Image: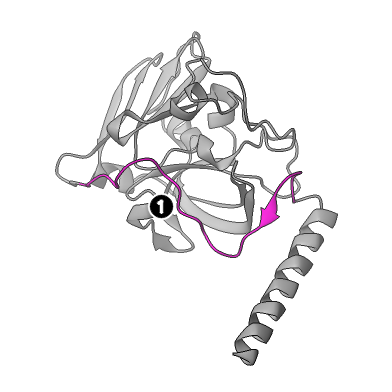
Amino acid sequence: MLNRWRARREQARRRRAVEEAMRRAGRLPPGQRLTQKFPVLHVGRIPPFDEATWRFRIWGEVERPLALTWGEFQALPRTTLVCDIHCVTQWSKFGTTWEGVAPATLVDLGLLRPTGSARFVLQVAARGYTTNLPLETILQPNFLLATHFEGRPLTLEHGFPLRGVIGHIPGRRELTDVYFWKGAKWLEGLHFVARDQPGTWERGGYHNEGHVWAEERWGRRF
């Protein structure tokens, strides 16, 4: 019992030391604390995945709608993103590694061509869940359509087969950093729109922009 208490105490000491180092390095936003785990947060049950019927769709203010099968999506060029992630519930996790497809890659391949009217993007996930981001944020290097985390396929509870991921790339403060809920689990498509359309949590009271460094956690209800 004593050894277990000492181990927990040492673990807490190490966590505080890392947390303080991240704060000094400018990587711990205000109001956040370090976690060494990966908390699971979502609404409702984990949706089923059927490879035969799954499609990743792009539609709305684009020159040509797109629908990709799971096999076609997996065959796209891959990107690795190493970033710090910050949850609105106040936990932060540093140096996480994700692999997937960058929306900017879809633009480079000619698969994604937003119209001149496109200004915002709704990530549309299973069971109608949505979250919104400006078009320019979706095309930043800190946003990814992720299929893997830390070298392994996403687990079901963390969004398999596909989730949006947005985080902070150390040293890149010119990028827009938003809270982790702005990347949708169980992602099924991107809806490009001319006018902003707040998503599920934004309509429920979360801040519409959700900027990490400004602590934009809560906003008005839509």
Magenta stretch mostly in which secondary structure? loop
Q: Residue at x 54, y 57 (%)?
A: 97
Q: Which residue in the rendered view is the most extreme toward the front?
A: 1
Q: Residues within 10 Å of mark 1 (few under 14, many from 20)?
A: many
Question: What count of labels does the image hold?
Answer: 1
Q: Which residue is mark 1?
A: 158
Q: Nearer the viewer, residue 142 or 14?
A: 14
In the depicted structure, whether residue 7 falls above or below residue 34:
below
Q: Residue at x 60, y 41 (%)?
A: 88
Q: Please identify the quarter of the rendering in which residue 93 is found.
A: bottom right
Percent x, y for residue 49?
A: 22, 47
Percent x, y for residue 120?
A: 51, 19
Q: Which of the image's four quarters has the N terminus?
A: bottom right
User: In the rendered view, does 219 fall on the left or right side of 184?
Assistant: right
Q: Please identify the quarter of the rendering in which residue 37 is found.
A: bottom right
Q: Residue at x 30, y 47 (%)?
A: 46
Does 201 lie within the magenta span?
no
Percent x, y for residue 68?
A: 26, 35
In the depicted structure, whether residue 65 falls above or below residue 71:
above
Q: Nearer the viewer, residue 160 or 216?
A: 216
Q: Residue at x 70, y 68 (%)?
A: 15
The colour scheme applied to this rendered structure is one colour
Residue range of the region highlighted in magenta in the rendering:
28-49
Determine whether the residue tagged by mark 1 lies in a helix, strand or loop: helix
Percent x, y for residue 13?
A: 75, 74
Does 38 lie within the magenta span?
yes
In the depicted structure, whether residue 134 falls above or below residue 25:
above
In the depicted structure, whether residue 30 falls above or below residue 2:
above
Q: Which residue in the rendered view is the most extreme toward the left?
A: 52
Q: Which residue in the rendered view is the most extreme toward the right?
A: 24
Amino acid found under the numbered disc labelled 1: His
